Image: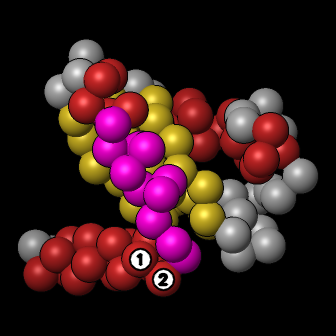
Amino acid sequence: MKWVVYIVECSDKSLYAGITNDLSQRLNAHNKGLGAKYTKYRRPVTIRYREVHDTKGAALTREAAIKSLNRKAKLALISEQSSVMLMHE
């Protein structure tokens, strides 16, 4: 099973990081108010970043690292991934 570390942008422009093994289901849960307590009143949320890991432990470690980043660093991470994705299209 693959695990995804993700960052969503909330309606108030704040960023939330989490992990899941089903990103589309988790995104739907966030947008229905059934996801994390943090996102419940900050809907809708939009996926801004994702990376895949082979184990839940690796995903949890990476999630903790991302959560420790300040907003500027998280936005740089998002921007970096967006640039890579555009190069591969």
User: What residue occupies the far left of the structure in this picture?
Assistant: 88
Q: Quadrant of residue 11?
A: bottom right
Label 1, secondary structure: give it.
Answer: helix
**Above or below — where is 31 with respect to 45?**
above
Numbered disc total: 2
Image-based side of 64 in relation to 40, left or right: left
Kindly identify which numbered label has been placed on residue 72: 2
| Quarter of the figure that contains the N terminus | top left
Image-based side of 18 in relation to 85, left or right: right
What kind of residue is marked 1? Answer: Ala
**Above or below — where is 58 with respect to 42?**
above
Label 2, secondary structure: give it.
Answer: helix
Badge 1, how many Cα within 10 Å: few under 14, some, many 20+? few
Q: Which residues are magenta?
A: 61-71
Q: Quadrant of residue 80?
A: bottom left
**Above or below — where is 49 with respect to 79?**
above
Where residue 15 sits: x, y (%)?
A: 61, 65
Q: Quadrant of residue 84?
A: bottom left
User: What residue occupies the far top of the structure in this picture?
Assistant: 1
- Mark 1, residue position: 73
| Quarter of the figure that contains the C terminus | bottom left
Q: Are marks 2 and 1 in contact (CB under 8 Å)?
A: yes
Query: Residue drawn at (58%, 34%), measured in percent from left and top?
Result: 26
Badge 2, how many Cα within 10 Å: few under 14, some, many 20+? few
Where residue 46 sits: x, y (%)?
A: 60, 61
Residue 52 visible within the image = yes
Where residue 32 sits: x, y (%)?
A: 80, 39
What kind of residue is marked 2? Answer: Lys
Measured in 3D between alpha carbons, the distance from the residue under mark 2 to the one under mark 1, in whole angstroms, is: 4 Å
